[in-house]
Amino acid sequence: MDGWRPGEQCMDNAPRDEQFPRGFPRGKGLGPSLPRVPIPEKVQETLYDPSGAMRQQVCEEGVVWHWSGAKGNEWLSQAFIPALGVVRYWTRVRGKYQEMRRDMPNVMWRCFFTDYRGDNGWCKVRCVHASGREVHYEGESLNLSLRMVIMPKGNVIYFEGEGRGTYKVRTYIPPNRAGGHDIMLHYGWYNGYSVATGGKRVMTSQVVSDGRVRIMDGAPAEERIIRTTLPSGNVQEFEGPRGSERLVRNKMAGDVFHYKGERGHEAIYRMERVGGDVHMYKGPKGNEHLTSLLKYDRDRTALVSVTTYAGKRGQERRSRKLDMKDGCVHVFSGGSGSGLPNGLGLTYEEDCNRILCRSGALVTRLNSASPWVALDESDASAPAAKRQRVMDTAQGLYAELEALTEKVSAVQEGQLIELGEHFKALREAVSKCVA
């Protein structure tokens, strides 16, 4: 059975105060602006090299500017701003300033600027934290958009949208955190809302590298698995809150298994075969045993027979069978259970030595080698005690069948009416067998 651990696979493994670098989208603001050139009235000291080229300026509040280039063509290459805890580095390409790096040692971030394009300073930014967390941005220098976050333990979160309208679309979880398999989490808008309407993102599906696909549903932080498609094509359906999902149905090669019980203790109680037959089970998980079998015609519309079974798992044997066409009840005895209708081509070993007909006749034989003898209510050779046992047996079957049809949703209303008519006729027949 498929399963997942939301607490492990979806946790944010970085402290909240270091989620994003300061001065970038989703991070805290830096407060004062970051000018690229010093304000002249705030310059306290200027240093020059032997050629007379300006190399350093010390300004108010400890701000230090470093310059590169020949005399008369100096350009700002580095700035240290103590109040912000920021060190910035620039280069010049074809006469344009391009920031290369920004260090924020006070909060342990370092950002790298690459891949500049166009006239508006479009670039990519990769910010790395001392914890190993990485945050990636792209866009124009004054309108960067979040694109990816790499978590310290290897999770990768992808984003789309522009500026303030960015939103999470996928999360990749590496094999060491997903039970030996890669896994990709996909997100969508909760209840159809969008970023424009202030909507929230929720997990909508999980794709595992072994071929499993999980479909999710639920409010933010309450997403739960509702369906899993396995590589074999089997489809499992779940119910219950996040982290406590329990298996309720399993579709395998056309057969449908129904389960009941809490997570980890789901037991089969009904199986619907691809041909239309319905198997009913009882017992805890791992020890379910067959109790009844409803067989249908080829068109899957009419109920042909209902058979009840006795015996524990693996040793089920036929007990009684109601033929819906003639209304006869077949009573079985003996057998080892090897005739369980499991599609393995095994033969039944139980013996049927008694048949109660709709007409009220009781047909019996001593064993499979003996001839059938028909008895009716006027036959003195049928002791009253024996006929009473037959009635008790048949009435027990009625009770089981009535309880069964209340649970099997596949039995249509018309078939229930037909069953009722058989029950009535059989009761009358049984009554005639009683002295």
Image (cartoon, rainbow, N blue to C red):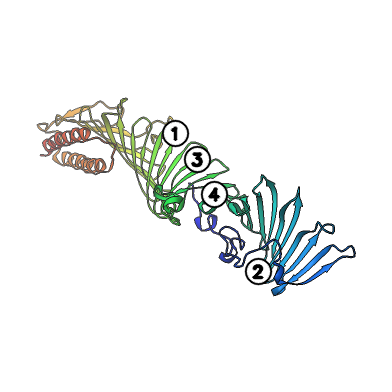
Task: Give whichever of discs 3 and 4 has the lower sequence position.
Answer: 4
Q: Nearer the viewer, residue 79 or 354?
A: 79
The tag earlier along the polypeptide, 1 or 3, is: 3
| Tag 1 residue | 253
Q: CA distance from mark 4 to mark 2?
A: 27 Å
The spot of residue 18 in percent (x, y) is 60, 64
At label 1, counting other C-alpha atoms closer than 10 Å, the crowd grade (few under 14, some 14-19, many 20 or more) is: few
Sooner in the amino-acid sequence: mark 1 or mark 2: 2
Q: Nearer the viewer, mark 3 or mark 2?
A: 2
Say left or right for 91 vs 409: right
Going from N to C along the chain, the mark reached first, 4 or 1, is 4
Dot 4: what SS?
loop
**Residue 162: numbered disc:** 4
* Dots 1, 2 in contact, CB < 8 A: no
Residue extending furthest right?
50
Relative to 57, is 160 on the left or the right? left
Q: Residues within 10 Å of mark 4 (few under 14, many from 20)?
A: some
